[in-house]
């Protein structure tokens, strides 16, 4: 039963993310900036701790 609830929760979260990316302007902007920041951290060769912190910050 617990796995079923987890799967449903993840499914609803993904649906919400897709909905937000389709219809919400601010979420599109935030996602774009987050992707740019992550790519720049890789290109500029940040150390692993900094990359982890950036990824955590972008997910917030």
Image (cartoon, rainbow, N blue to C red):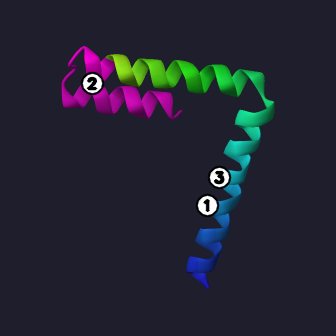
Q: Residue at x 76, y 42 (%)?
A: 19
2 or 1: tag closer to the N-terminus: 1
The magenta stretch spans residue 59:
yes
**Nearest to viewer (mark 3 / mark 2):** 3
Callout 2 crowding tier (Cα within 10 Å): few <14, some 14–19, many ≥20 = few
Q: What predominant SS class does the magenta segment belong to?
A: helix
Callout 1 crowding tier (Cα within 10 Å): few <14, some 14–19, many ≥20 = few
* Residue picked out by circle 1: 10
Highlighted range, magenta: 41-60
Q: Position of residue 24 (x, y in %)?
A: 78, 29
**Figure quadrant of the N terminus:** bottom right
Residue at mark 3 to residue at mark 2: CA–CA distance:
27 Å
Against 11, residue 14 (above or below) is above
User: Disc number at residue 40?
Assistant: none
Q: Position of residue 5 (x, y in %)?
A: 64, 74
User: Disc number at residue 14?
Assistant: 3
**On the picture, is 47 further left or further right than 33?**
left
Residue at mark 2 to residue at mark 1: CA–CA distance:
28 Å
Q: Secondary structure at mark 1?
A: helix
Residue at mark 3 to residue at mark 1: CA–CA distance:
6 Å
Q: Secondary structure at mark 3?
A: helix
**On the picture, is 42 further left or further right than 33?**
left
The magenta stretch spans residue 20:
no
Q: Residue at x 70, y 44 (%)?
A: 18
**Residue 44 in which image quadrant:** top left
Callout 3 crowding tier (Cα within 10 Å): few <14, some 14–19, many ≥20 = few
**Nearest to viewer (mark 2 / mark 1):** 1
* Residue picked out by circle 2: 50
């Amino acid at each position: 039963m617990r796995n079923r609830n987890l799967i449903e929760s993840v499914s609803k979260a993904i649906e919400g993310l897709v909905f937000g990316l389709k219809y919400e302007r601010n979420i599109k902007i935030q996602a774009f900036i987050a992707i740019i920041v992550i790519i720049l951290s890789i290109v500029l060769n940040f150390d692993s701790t900094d990359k982890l912190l950036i990824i955590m910050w972008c997910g917030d």
